[in-house]
Structure formats: C-alpha cells, structure tokens
Image (tube, grey):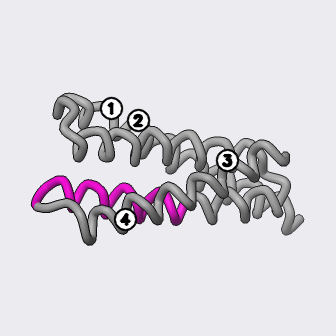
Amino acid sequence: MNVLMGLAALSGAMAVGAGAFGAHGAHGEAAEWLKTGGQYQLVHAVAALVALQMQARGSAWLFVIGAAIFAGTLYLMALGMPRWLGAVTPIGGALLIGGWLWLAWTAARMGN
C-alpha cells in the first residue's frame, strides 16, 4: 500500500506543478491542456488516497494509472509532442471512470 500511496502523493505534486505551469508559464492551447491535466490528475490523486482508506486498492490503481495516461498525454502535447497523443487520452479517461465505478461498488458492499 505504501507504494500506491506514494504514487498518489507524487501524482498530486505533479498535478500542482503542471497546473501552475499552465497558469503562469504556458500560453494558448498548451496552457489549457496543462490546466485540464492538472485538474484531473489532482482530483484523482485525492480519490486514490480515499480509495486506499476504503480498502479499494483496485480503484486506487485505476485512478493513478488513468490519471497518468490522461494527464500525461495532455502534458506531452503541451510540451510539443505530436497531437496524435490526444487519441490515447480517452484510454486514461476510461480507466478513471472504471476507478469510480469500482469505488461505488466497494462503497455499496460496505453498506451491507
């Protein structure tokens, strides 16, 4: 669990850095990609920590990996990498949705 918790914390730190760069150092479309990636990554870093508290490790992994793919592709495009990476971004989004569904299932099981 410590590795996953550490990854979630690093993900949160990266999100803050990307969001700050998007707000203060980048312009145009790159700034928007950095802000969007930072927002999604930060929310899901916190969600991963919540999932760990709920003993939903699978959900936490989906949040960390999904955020890395979703935000990472946006960050790479903002830094000048090819725009075709945008076609990979929805894979990260699908993993994030899966993480939320897993967390909902875990919560429902806890209620019984």
Give the Cα separation between the discs numbered 4 and 1: 20 Å
> Dot 2 corresponds to which residue?
91
Give the Cα separation between the discs numbered 2 and 4: 21 Å
Task: Give the number of the disc on residue 9.
Answer: none
Outermost residue on the right side: it is: 112
Q: Is residue 30 magenta?
A: yes
Which comes sooner in the sequence, label 2 or label 4? Answer: 4
| Tag 3–tag 4 contact (CB < 8 Å) | no
Looking at the picture, does residue 39 appear above or below residue 97?
A: below
Give the Cα separation between the discs numbered 3 and 2: 19 Å
> Dot 4 corresponds to which residue?
19
| Tag 1–tag 2 contact (CB < 8 Å) | yes
Q: Chief secondary structure of the magenta span? A: helix
- Name which quarter of the figure residue 107 lies in: bottom right
Which comes sooner in the sequence, label 1 or label 3? Answer: 3
- Name which quarter of the figure residue 54 lies in: bottom right
Task: Give the number of the disc on residue 7.
Answer: 3
> Dot 1 corresponds to which residue?
88
Dot 1 amino acid type: Val
Residue 50 place in picture, x, y as percent: 73, 65
Looking at the picture, does residue 64 appear above or below residue 20?
A: above
Give the Cα separation between the discs numbered 1 and 2: 6 Å
Span of residues in magenta: 28-44
Dot 2 amino acid type: Ile
